[in-house]
Image (cartoon, rainbow, N blue to C red):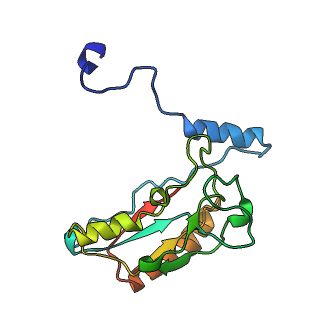
Amino acid sequence: MAAMGRGLGFAAAHDIAVPYIDRSRAYYLAMGYPKPYEWAHLAEVPFNALDKPLNQSSITVITTAAPITPGNGNQGAGAAMNPAAAFQQIYSAPSANAPDLGISHLHYDRGHTDAADQGAFMPLPALADAAAAGRIGSVAPRFHGVPTRYSHRLSLKRDGPELLARLREDQTDAAILVAI
């Protein structure tokens, strides 16, 4: 393998991905939960091919970022973990005039990023550039925020159908999922 990988850009054998799922399961047990966290995973992936070319399709963004809400503590770039900034219901906002968003309510590696680049979790400007260049048909009229849930039931029975109804209402053909 070493000879085969020379010059091809392969990582060293010891350079492997962080075993995130195993670490998360151990973390939940260490926190005192009676069983490890069970990740949602489906036997079949519920994605479909586009019915028309991308340059004729309406595209939106679905994010877990939250609108910055006055009175809910520090939510800006560099903010510490802030559960008060979390949201519990799906929200939608105009794609052309997106509010300031934050990710202070989410767990992420604050040692290596400060969340100052809104484009990392809300790529609407890049999507608008793609529409202007003709790579996509259009940006959908609204983008959508979906709360992070530890309840598979709520995600499947409430949030999923509500989000799908909003996407259909906007005649959206595809979505970019940005989950932090």
92 sits left or right of 152 in the view: left
The one of 128 and 144 positioned closer to us in this rendering: 128
Q: Position of residue 82 (x, y in %)?
A: 72, 58
Name the quadrant containing residue 54.
Answer: bottom left
**Image point (56%, 46%), residue name:** 113
Residue 52 at least partly seen: no
Query: Residue shown at 39%/81% (left/top)?
Result: 141
Q: Residue furthest top?
A: 3
Image spot of residue 77 (x, y percent): 60, 56
Residue 121 in picture, x, y percent from top left: 49, 59
Q: Left or right: 31 with respect to 13? A: right
| Residue farthest along the bottom direction in this orientation | 169
Residue 15 versus residue 29 in the image, above or below: above
Residue located at (60% from left, 36% from top): 22
- In the image: residue 174, left or right of residue 26: left
Give the residue at x 66% y 71%: 88
Residue 142 versus residue 165: which sits nearer the camera?
A: 142
Foreground pick, 38 / 141 = 141
- Vertical relation: 5 (above or below) 73: above
**Residue 62 at x, y percent in the picture:** 46, 67
The answer to whether residue 47 of the structure is visible from this angle is yes
